[in-house]
Amino acid sequence: MNSVAEILSIAPLNWLGLLCAVVGGGIIGIERQICGKPVGIRTSALICVGAYVFVTVANTVSSSSTDNSRIIGQVVTGVGFLGAGVMMARDGIVIGVTSAATIWVQSAIGILIASGYYLSGIKLSLFTVAILVGVNMLERTFKLFQRGVHQQFAQVRNRRRKIDFDPYSSPQADGDVAEEPCARDTENEVRP
């Protein structure tokens, strides 16, 4: 008869590492979802968990003739393709670069947790959110950060809002367009 410990075992993985991967990805995913970005809580948690599982299993089956860093390299490459799928071109501007970079960081967090650095993975998640929120605040506050591509994208977005605006269907009487939860929607655009 199997004991409870055997039934609950997820060896070679462990519950703490799995929980840290979900929390690490979820922390970033909450910020992304609140801002309406394509990579939310569910996707972010799954990216971290996937990286955690691949690296943990690779560490388990390693021998003196294998190189575990190759698995890490393959995770980074695979996640790069996932990130490329998030980027799109709109009105001559490439959007989604920040979401793609965030996916890349999430895989790094999963790898970090799989390497046994649980607390560092959570700290890196918090640091990533601080960067995302902090830069958004800087861009909203200072005109200096609204130059170049950011300014061009903001102008395109504002033109679209004026075209799409219908004062009779809007709940606002003065004609202002409601702010999104994350006032800027620039995603670090890059001109091709």
Image (spheres, rainbow, N blue to C red):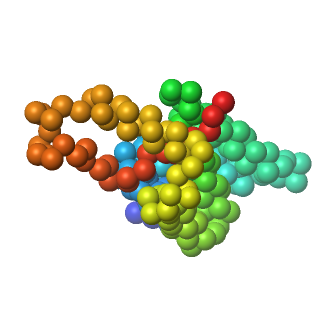
Quadrant where the N terminus sits is: bottom left
Quarter of the image that includes the C terminus: top right
Between 168 and 60, the one lying in front of the other is 168
The answer to whether residue 76 of the structure is visible from this angle is yes
Q: Residue at horizontal 57%, vertical 33%?
A: 94
Q: Quadrant of residue 5?
A: bottom left
User: Would residue 80 appear left or right of 134 to someone viewing this image?
Assistant: right
Residue at (44, 45) in percent of width and height? 185
**Can you say whether 88 is above or below 35 in the image?**
above
Q: Position of residue 187 (x, y in %)?
A: 52, 45
In this rendering, does residue 39 appear at all? no
Residue 68, percent from left and from top:
78, 51
Residue shown at the point (30%, 28%) measured from the top left? 163
Residue located 49% across and 39% down the image: 153
* Residue 119 in picture, x, y percent from top left: 57, 73
- Asked if residue 73 lies left or right of residue 30, the reply is right
> Which one is in front, 96 or 17?
96
Foreground of the two, 98 or 52: 98
150 displayed left or right of 178: right
Q: Nearer the viewer, residue 35 or 26?
A: 35
State the image coordinates of residue 37 (x, y, percent, origin top left): 42, 44
Disc count in the image?
0
